[in-house]
Every structure is written in C-alpha cells, then in structure tokens.
Image (cartoon, rainbow, N blue to C red):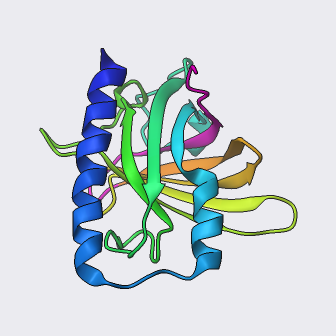
Amino acid sequence: MRHDVLRRMAIAALSGAALLACERNEEPPASRVAVARRLVGTWDVTFWLDSERTISTYVHASAPVAGTLVFALDHYGRLDAPELNAPTNDGLYDADFRPFGFSTRDGDNVPVVVARLVPRPTGDSVYVVLSPGRTRFSVRMTGRLVDDSAVGDWRAAAFSAGGGAGRFAMRRRREPT
C-alpha cells in the first residue's frame, strides 16, 4: 500500500516537473545528465543513529530507521534549496525519523528530496537533502555512490533545539520484471 501511494506521488510530481521543464526551453549539459542518470530510480535507505553525535539527550534509538527515496533527473535546477545548490536530481522520500526524536515533515507537506552527484575516480560523491528549505528538520546526507549502493553520514538540524546524526546506507531497488 505505501509503495503504491509513493509511486503515485512520484508520478504526479514528475509529471508536473516535466510540464515546467517544457516551459524553459533549455537543455542541461550532456555530461551533467549522464552523471545524474546514475541516481534515477527507487532506493531503499537505512539510517543509524549515533548517540554520541546526537544533540538530543533524551533519544537513544537502537533500531535503525528504514525508508525509500525516489529520484528523477533535475534537468533545470528548479528545486535549488538553501542546503544544496545545483541539484542533479530531485524526487520524493518516505522515512519516519520520530524514533530518533525529530520529524522532517510539517502536516501534509510533500516529502521532497534533492540530490547532487559529483564524479570522482573512487566513486561518485552523493549529496542528498530530505525536506530542503523547511522549518522542520532537514536531513543532509553525504556519502559515496559505487555501483548501485551508497554509504555515508547524515545529520539533521533545525532552527529549534534537537537533531541527530549518524550513518546511512542506500541500495537501488530492483523492480520485478
């Protein structure tokens, strides 16, 4: 059920982005598109909380938080955010950080994600922001993408007290054929 809802949300969001893209009549550089295609698709992600790097003294979650990220190409950079300039990808996510003592979403806000891939010889650097530009907690992820998986660090911060930090791992989901 959750995957169907997420898939419908992704299709609606991507359709809207395609319509907006048609209005701009600009094409991104081919090299940027080639790099960005590596992130397109559905990814399963797991977040682990590092209690030593966590701001809240009341939360010591031992179980990881699992979620889903769905990325499309960001052809025109229309979703620039204060936390990440010139994204190569944008999309939606589904993850509940309440076990870690914070939330990334206000009410009925669409759970937006932006990302940027930077090519490196030892594996592309990946930068991801969940809920960019929101007053609630945005989650910033930094790691290395090699083949169909990425690992790295995440941190969450907001204008109010609290937050968290830890490690993440994501793997591209293989859709049944």
Give 25 or 84, whichever is nearer the viewer. Answer: 25
**Quarter holding the C terminus?**
top right
Identify the residue shown where x is 60% and y is 36%.
50
Splitting the image into 4 quarters, where does residue 70 fall?
top left
Point out residue 123 in the picture as x, y percentages from the top left corner.
80, 58
Give 59 or 144, whichever is nearer the viewer. Answer: 144
Point out residue 127 in the picture as x, y percentages from the top left corner.
57, 60
Left or right? Give the position of 73 relative to 51.
Answer: left
Count of numbered tags = 0
Give 60 or 83, whichever is nearer the viewer. Answer: 83
Splitting the image into 4 quarters, where does residue 74 fall?
bottom left
Q: Is residue 106 above or below residue 32?
A: above
Q: Which residues are magenta?
A: 158-177
Q: Is residue 166 magenta?
A: yes
Identify the residue shown where x is 26% and y is 26%.
5
Q: Is residue 47 magenta?
A: no
Point out residue 36 in the picture as x, y percentages from the top left corner.
58, 63
Identify the residue shown where x is 30% and y is 14%.
1
Left or right? Give the position of 171 relative to 162.
Answer: right
Q: Is residue 168 above or below residue 176?
A: below
Residue lying furthest right = 122
Q: Is residue 144 above or below residue 111?
A: below
